[in-house]
Image (cartoon, rainbow, N blue to C red):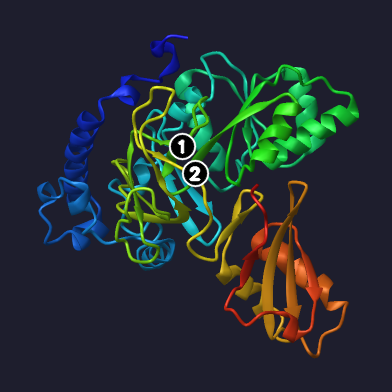
């Protein structure tokens, strides 16, 4: 395959110095645009000369925005916290994500910038893509569908769950490409074999929203599907992606990524592990120095595939206690909300484990006046608040460590 066919566009193979100069020019223009058109940034940048932010060192002087900040802003100035630069009437969608957060999109080709990740994973015009991310309320499915449409691919909007129906669709429609979580792909491929369905057309996939241990990647390959990872969020869109070199994750051309000391916003030395901070060049929703809560580190050099942008090692854990379970964030505040529904609970800790790449979560709780039957009621609260299935277990109070953890992610990613 020639470079022209390998790369989505020429931006991916730019000289790194040229890219940096162009990104900094775009950044200054973006900050000026945000200051002039987004009420929140009009206040935050009131004394800022946007043209002075012309380097990464200068960018690091700007304040960091965290999920908690975003939630507070949206409550104060609903629904988007004054970060949007256009009126709501000019948006295409307003999505609702766990934690009571809202995200917009607009009528712009590949708004979420996922075409680049899909192209690197092998999607080409005319491929049939089966998308199993959620189409309900959250933007998960649309993040990737917008990229498919930009490339020119029909999309099967499978959504989440309904495993046997999805398998039948795949057997009938013979998609070339899978999109979704790696754990769901494993379930689909294993169940299809049990049912005797031929999914041999399905050769490749772009997976995300949860960790992809090497063991699971190999298991999927043994089942007939080679997968690459994409890394994005509902707030930011595509952030980074793997190429066929499978040597780190390449930063998208439409964002500026920093790795900083967790909680401080101060950049770490190259190669050190820190929190991923992202500034988008999205003119509609210009999030600046947004803290993802994810840990990663910069890889030296450039990818063997020929793409020249900065690379990160991929997901290396969370900088806070929030984690992902079956593609959805689970936050400490939600665990406290579950416990709050049951006044008898004195301590609670959500423990997430994995057995043979099958994730499960159990809320271990102490309730001196409770009994074993109480677990069923707690499980109903888990489903109601997290919109996810989980078990509950009544335990002795002294079996729960006094270490401040509300969520314990005990999964292994080897």
Image point 31% across, 19% down: which residue? 10
Q: Is residue 79 above or below residue 235?
A: below
Q: Residue 261: give x, y in percent of width and height.
A: 36, 61
Q: Which residue is mark 2?
A: 314
Image point 51% across, 14% down: which residue? 125
Q: Is residue 222 left or right of residue 157?
A: right
Q: Residue 220: give x, y in percent of width and height.
A: 71, 32
* Dots 1, 2 in contact, CB < 8 A: yes
Image point 85% across, 23% down: which residue? 197
Secondary structure of the residue carrying numbered label 1: strand
Q: Is residue 77 above or below residue 153?
A: below
Count of residue discs: 2
Q: Residue 376: give x, y in percent of width and height.
A: 83, 71
Furthest residue toward top: 2
Q: Quadrant of residue 406?
A: bottom right
Mark 1 vs 2, N-terminal side: 1
Q: Which sits in the foreground, 226 or 271?
A: 271
Q: Which residue is mark 1?
A: 249
Tell me how far mark 1 sits from mark 2, CA to CA.
Answer: 6 Å
């Amino acid at each position: 395959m020639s470079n022209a066919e390998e790369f989505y566009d020429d931006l991916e193979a730019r000289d790194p110095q040229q890219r940096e100069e162009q990104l900094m020019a775009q950044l200054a223009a973006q900050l000026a645009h945000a200051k002039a058109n987004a009420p929140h940034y009009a206040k935050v940048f009131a004394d800022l000369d946007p043209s002075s932010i012309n380097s990464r060192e200068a960018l690091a002087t700007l304040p960091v925005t965290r999920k908690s900040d975003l939630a507070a802003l949206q409550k104060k100035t609903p629904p988007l916290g004054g970060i949007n630069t256009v009126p709501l009437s000019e948006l295409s969608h307003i999505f609702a994500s766990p934690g009571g957060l809202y995200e917009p999109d607009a009528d712009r080709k590949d708004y979420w910038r996922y075409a680049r990740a899909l192209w690197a994973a092998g999607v080409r015009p005319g491929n049939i893509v089966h998308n199993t991310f959620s189409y309900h309320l959250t933007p998960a499915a649309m993040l990737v569908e917008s990229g498919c449409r930009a490339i020119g691919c029909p999309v099967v909007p499978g959504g989440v769950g309904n495993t046997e129906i999805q398998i039948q669709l795949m057997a009938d429609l013979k998609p070339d490409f899978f999109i979704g979580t790696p754990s769901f792909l494993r379930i689909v491929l294993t169940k299809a074999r049990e049912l005797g369905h031929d999914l041999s057309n399905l050769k490749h996939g772009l997976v995300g929203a949860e960790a992809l241990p090497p063991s699971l990647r190999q298991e999927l390959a043994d089942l007939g599907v080679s997968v690459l990872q994409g890394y994005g969020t509902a707030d930011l869109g595509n952030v980074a992606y793997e190429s066929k070199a499978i040597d780190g994750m390449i930063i998208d051309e439409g964002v500026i990524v920093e790795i900083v000391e967790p909680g401080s916003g101060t950049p770490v030395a190259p190669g050190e592990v820190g929190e991923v901070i992202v500034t988008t060049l999205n003119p509609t929703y210009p999030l600046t120095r947004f803290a993802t809560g994810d840990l990663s580190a910069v890889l030296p050099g450039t990818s063997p595939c020929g793409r020249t942008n900065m690379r990160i090692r991929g997901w290396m854990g969370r900088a806070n206690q929030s984690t992902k379970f079956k593609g959805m964030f689970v936050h400490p505040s939600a665990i406290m909300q579950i416990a709050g529904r049951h006044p008898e609970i004195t301590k609670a800790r959500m423990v997430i484990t994995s057995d043979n790449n099958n994730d499960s979560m159990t809320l271990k709780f102490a309730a001196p006046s409770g009994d074993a039957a109480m677990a069923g009621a707690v499980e109903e609260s888990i489903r109601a608040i997290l919109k996810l299935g989980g078990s509950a277990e009544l335990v002795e109070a002294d079996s729960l460590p006094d270490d401040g953890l509300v969520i314990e992610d005990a999964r292994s990613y080897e």
